[in-house]
Amino acid sequence: MKILMLVAVLMGLASCSTTPVKESESEHLRSLDVNRINEIFRIQSIAAKDVWPGFEKAKFRFILVGQKYQWAVNVNPMPSYYRALPIPEALNKEIVSLGVTEKYRDEFGAKQTEAPEVLYNSYSKEMTGLHFKHSIYLVKTLEEYHRIGDKQAAEEWIHISLHELFHTFQDQYVNYTPELLKAITIPLKKNITKDIEHTELLKPEVELLAKAACSSSSIEAKRYLKSALKLRQKRWAFIEKKYNVKPERWERFDSWAEGTAHYVEHQIMSKMSFYKNDTLLVRDQLFSKFNEYTQENNVNWCSRIASNKKRSYWYSLGFSYSLILDKLMPDWKTKGFDNELYFDAFFKKLNLL
């Protein structure tokens, strides 16, 4: 009997040595989350500067939401309902503050019974009613996404986070007046993506933009872009007539805000060769070895723009505008943005509007 018991114990130990132990959630950040956060910082330090000058220096401030707790990372000042925690040694070069509270508090600090299923949300300080004194990003832990059926890979969680964290960086360029906030939160944005007539009007426009983005000739790219912008005027006239709402302001803003973040995210993904070999994710069970990143290149990007599979079409518009400006005005990302015209300010300088 003792021999059998000993064999059973040894088999159990052998099993433990090969099967990763799942960390139960406590008020402290789990090592898996620490590692994934560190991978965000590592990729930022390697790839962000070439993609968007200044983004490599951006301080990432976010709320990480788990099953029982949520953590405030680099939030300053920290809302009173957070209790300060010691910063994990692995993160002490990247973050200056860490706090914890029971979940779920929304962007206004209001206690909710449950976090929304989709929680990749960035807010300017104005969008939080100044509850936060700086832009903030709210995201669930990767395990929380898996728990509700979203089986994304670890590197997908990271690159989507980089998209959202870019929003918190780009807010420095925007003057979020009450008028602008009202203009960009209209219900029309949800309705227009389901409008079949509008989708048909949009199709030739994005096809022209895809050709401009992938053209090897600046003259040709300008011609395609100019034609696309003429089609946009007709599409905007259709929207105003049908919905009695002028789309210029909110579409210019969203094409810039979402389009540039989409551009940054995919540009960073395309630079995988610079950071994949030293990834911190090698022991992460949810790591897929950057397999999806091999498809990140201009040809595939142009194909995606032309097909316009994203329902929020302004992502495709802004992504294509960014790629086109890389050809026509290579230093555009170092110049100031016009808060009324955004991309159109550059197109005016190029005599395309």
Image: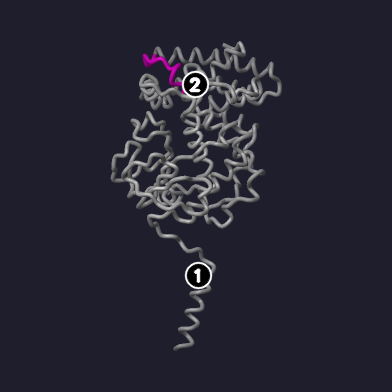
Q: Residue at x 52, y 44 (%)?
A: 158
Q: Is residue 279 left or right of residue 134?
A: right
Q: Which disc, if any, is residue 200?
A: 2
* Nearer-N-terminus badge (1/2): 1
- Residue 290 appears at what percent x and percent y? 60, 47
Q: Magenta span: helix, strand or loop, mainly?
A: helix
Residue ID for mark 1: 16
Q: Amino acid at mark 1?
A: Cys
| Image quadrant containing the N terminus | bottom left
In this rendering, the label closer to the viewer, 1 or 2: 1
Indicate the quadrant where residue 26 lies.
bottom left
Q: Nearer the viewer, residue 329 or 101?
A: 101
Within the magenta stretch, is there residue 247?
Answer: yes
Quarter of the view holding residue 268? top right
The answer to whether residue 78 shows anywhere in this view is yes
Disc 1 crowd rating (10 Å Cα; few below 14, some 14-19, many 20+) is few
- The answer to whether one can see residue 153 in this image is no
* Mark 1 touches mark 2? (CB < 8 Å): no
In the displayed structure, would residue 228 be above or below residue 309?
Answer: above
Residue at image point 35% right, 52% down: 68
Q: Residue at x 34, y 39 (%)?
A: 106
Q: Nearer the viewer, residue 177 or 185?
A: 177
Image: magenta residue range = 242-253
Q: CA distance from mark 1 to mark 2?
A: 57 Å
Secondary structure type for disc 1: helix
**Residue at image x 63%, y 34%?**
50
Amino acid type at image mark 2: Glu
In the rendered picture of this protein, how many numbered marks are placed on residues? 2
Q: Position of residue 192 (x, y in %)?
A: 41, 23
Image location of residue 150, percent across then percent down: 45, 47
Q: In front: 340, or 155? A: 340
In the picture, the quarter occupied by the C terminus is top right
